[in-house]
Amino acid sequence: MNTVFLEACRGQDVAYTPVWIMRQAGRYLPQYQAVRAHLDFLTLCKTPELAVKVTLQPVDILGVDAAILFSDILIPVEAMGMRLSFSEKQGPLLNEPIRNKSAVERLIVPDTEEDMPFVIETIKILRRELENKVPLIGFSGAPFTLATYMVEGGTSKNFLNTKKMMFQHNGVFSYLMEKLTDMVISYLSAQIKAGVQAVQLFDTWAGVLSPIDYKNFVLPYVKKINAELKKQEVPLIYFVNNCAGVLKEVKKSGADVVGIDWRIDLGDAIKKLGKKIVVQGNLDPCALFLSQEELEERIKDVLWKGEAAKGHIFNLGHGILPDTPVENVIALVEAVHRYGRKE
Ligand code: CP3
């Protein structure tokens, strides 16, 4: 198996900088669209043979150094008892948003094996299929990001309902965050037991908070998750979108690897994080719309800056966009492998 990704996560010497891409299985791939044409997104997530198929597509087509389980951060939220749907226009929708204590009380902490057996089954098949290929990454949404979807009922602009709960009904907010923290620990532990070789926590919306609010209302829960999972000895990756303002706090999260978005210079991010943390990132997903020559220059810049860290895993600064030209993504992976060679 190609283990360069796991070695980089641990800060070990590597032959070249590994690369994978957030949302690497998705609509920009015609092969994904072909599978999706016959069924809706949630059915795809819940059908192991098909989730396996789309997980493997980017490994075979792009030559990335890791696979990531095909699923969604909101799958366990549905298992907690909320009604989930995906709208083409509005993205994820959750019925009856959580606004008070009794709504939090009704949420259950699901048992992954019982309530989401398709996740376990997908992981087990993937490990067999990936045996001579690359490691498998499992993932979960981080508590705050999941809370925003649950309290807002979907995507939001200002996150006013979430922040109102945080500021005006802090007891309810912390009760929700505690329940989500328990869920994430149990969900990721089950993924690790089933065979994932690294886990990533996606905190897509934590960057909308002021540093002090991040420190008080988000960091303690992420620290608890990382401390619990540390015992299971797989690398822990923590990605915060829009991380620049909260990086000083993110440094204390206990993650082995911190994912960086593109709005901050990777060199500056490394200076803030120090020598003990491996970084992952951070090319602007829109750079894949540049000419291949200009794209290569940007890739070299990110690679060169990544050299200053304890370790570097190349990735985009956020998920790949649906219209991205596949030939540029193939060129990206090839360029990272070529220019990221160490000897
Ligand atoms: O990275 C991968 O390839 C693994 C699969 C994966 C998906 N979602 C598949 C998906 C992962 C890791 C996620 C995480 C996720 N889901 C996040 C965190 C990462 C991020 O991008 O910030 C968030 C916020 C979600 C919630 C979500 N799911 C949204 C907002 C949307 C709609 C927007 C969109 O891109 O369509 C989804 C749907 C979704 N999740 C799709 C895929 C491939 C598109 C569904 C389709 O086929 O129509």
Image (cartoon, helix red, strand yellow):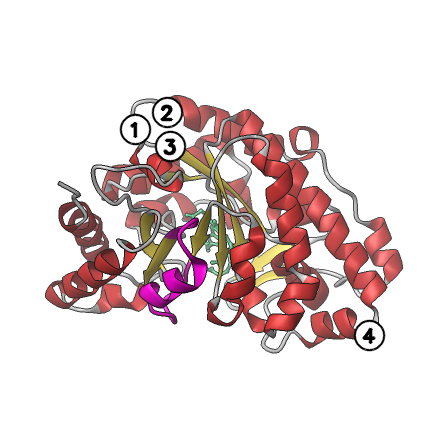
The amino acid type, in three-letter code, at marker 3 is Pro
Labels 2 and 3: the sequence-earlier one: 2
The amino acid type, in three-letter code, at marker 2 is Glu
The amino acid type, in three-letter code, at marker 1 is Lys
Labels 4 and 1: the sequence-earlier one: 1
Residue range (magenta): 260-279
Tags 2 and 1 in contact by the CB under 8 Å rule?
yes
Tags 4 and 3 in contact by the CB under 8 Å rule?
no
Question: Residue 154, how many percent across, how many down?
Answer: 63, 65
- The residue labelled by disc 1 is 133
Secondary structure under tag 1 reads: loop
- The residue labelled by disc 2 is 129
Q: Residue at x 23, y 56 (%)?
A: 303
Pick the front one: 187 or 269: 269
- The residue labelled by disc 4 is 168
Q: Nearer the viewer, mark 4 or mark 1?
A: 4
Q: Is mark 4 within 8 Å of ligand 1?
A: no
Question: Residue 89, how many percent across, how many down?
Answer: 51, 68
In this view, 63 is above or below 288: above
Q: How far apart in space, not on screen, are marks 2 and 4 (Cα)?
A: 49 Å
Q: How far apart in space, not on screen, are marks 2 and 3 (Cα)?
A: 11 Å
Tags 4 and 1 in contact by the CB under 8 Å rule?
no
Within 10 Å of the Cα at label 3, are there few (<14), some (14-19), or many (20+) other Cα atoms? many
The amino acid type, in three-letter code, at marker 4 is Gln
